[in-house]
Image: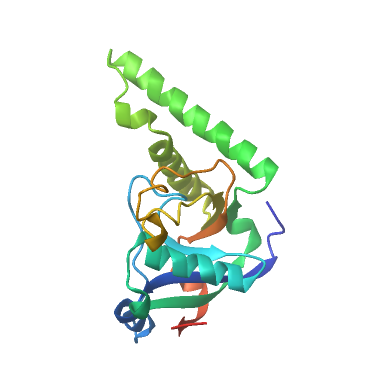
Amino acid sequence: MGNNEERVEIIGFHGTDVISCKKILGNGCSFKESKKETEWAGTGIYFFISEKDKKAYNDAHKWATDIKKIPNKNVSVIKANIRINKNKILDLREELTFEIFHEYKDSMFQKAIEAAREKKQKLKKDSINGRRLDTKAINRFCEEMRMHAVIVQRYINFKKNSKDNIEHLYDDYASSIPNCTIFCLRNQSFIIKKECIKNE
């Protein structure tokens, strides 16, 4: 998954509100980790990334306004410079990496099936929830392989809570084709710089 000595610098954008932005940039303060059982890329701090900073910034801003429902005047986007070993990133955009990951997840699921059979129990419905299983597998894989970050591509329905959705036409609007790239950082000590961007 990369040269052991190869370090990369990644620019990530995190959408939040003005007050949280000031707190995160305060002395000794840090980002709050996302720890739900149905995260896109496991436990960690979420950023949008792109080859074009403007695209990642816009995604972070849309996340804050359209998903978190923060009024536009109260939105701030944090730009973070992250320096990390490339081989410590689980990059699920790479074919070999996602093949290895899916084999790992399938093996984990098979063990859960076998354990349930031994106990003569049925698997709980939550255990076969795709996103919940992904989250659990990513967290376990990262812990075992000592990965510090995860990159995934996802489709996010930014229109769902937007002012364009007055008639709820976008409630179920979805796509199987990703529209953004997400970087989940599991160890924030790799952030070498962070700054608050009120409006770009």
Furthest-front residue in this view = 167
- Is residue 86 depicted above or below 17 in this figure? above
Q: Quadrant of residue 14?
A: bottom left
The answer to whether residue 187 is seen in the rendering is no
Q: Quadrant of residue 140?
A: top left
Between 7 and 178, which is closer to the camera in this rendering? Answer: 178
Between 112 and 69, which is closer to the camera in this rendering? Answer: 69
Residue at the spot x=34%, y=45% of the render?
37
x and y percentages locating residue 46 in the rendered image: 45, 62
x and y percentages locating residue 142 in the rendered image: 49, 49
The answer to whether residue 55 is seen in the rendering is yes
Q: Is residue 23 left or right of residue 78?
A: left
- Is residue 160 depicted above or below 174 in this figure? below
- Is residue 197 depicted above or below 66 in this figure? below
Q: Tell me how the rendering is colored.
A: rainbow
Q: Is residue 11 left or right of residue 32?
A: right
Residue at the spot x=28%, y=12% of the render?
120
- Is residue 112 depicted above or below 88 in this figure? above
Between 194 and 63, which is closer to the camera in this rendering? Answer: 63
